[in-house]
Image: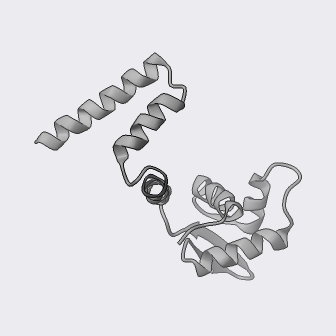
Amino acid sequence: MQLTNAEEQVMKYLWKLEKAYLKNLIDEFPEPRPATTTVATLLKRMIDKEFVGYNQHGSNREYYPLVKKSDYFARNLNLMIRDFFNNSSTQFASFFTNEAGLTLQELEELRRIVDKKIEKSKK
C-alpha cells in the first residue's frame, strides 16, 4: 500500500523523531504549518494503512512508525524500477548514472559500493 505525498511528509518527520505526539509532528513542518486536524486525519489514515502505531497516554497519543524507512523506500524503488524501467535494474542504473549529475568522486564511490557488493556475492 502506498502513502500519499502528504502522508509521506508526516512519515518522514516520524522516522526522524522515532516517537512523537501530534504537536511534535506539527512543529516539524515549516511555516505555514498545517492545521492540527489535517495532521490528525493523515495519522488516522496512516494507522489504518498500518504504517503508524501509537501508545495512548491519558488523552494523548504517542505515534511511532511501524514501517522502517529503508523498507519503505526499497519497496518504492522496486516499484519505480518495475513501472518505469521495464523491471530492469540495469536500465535504472544507466539512467541514474547518466541523469543524476554525479561527480567523478560520487561515481568512484558508487563503483566501490558495487565492487564490494560483487565481492560479497561471490562468497
Between residues 27 and 119, which one lies in front from this camera angle? 119
Q: Quadrant of residue 94?
A: top left
**Is 5 in front, or is 100?**
100
**Is 94 located above or below residue 47 in the figure?**
above
Check the image and name the residue furthest to the front: 86
Measured as percent of width and height from the top left, residue 85 is found at 44, 49
Vertical order, 17 against 89 (above or below): below
In the rendered image, residue 47, in percent from the top left (x then y), is placed at: 61, 77
- Residue at 64% x, 80% y is 56
Instruction: Give the quadrant of residue 54.
Output: bottom right
Quadrant location of the C terminus?
A: top left
Number of marks = 0
Colouring used for the render: one colour
Q: Residue at x 60, y 81 (%)?
A: 48
Residue occupying the point 42% across, 43% down: 92
Q: Is residue 68 left or right of residue 55?
A: left
Residue closer to the observer: 85 or 119: 85
Residue farthest to the right, as pictured: 32
Residue 118 in picture, x, y percent from top left: 21, 37
Q: Residue at x 63, y 73 (%)?
A: 46
Please state the horizontal and vertical placement of residue 43, each as a whole percent of the image.
68, 73
Q: Residue furthest left?
A: 123
Q: As drawn, is 33 to the left or to the right of 107? A: right
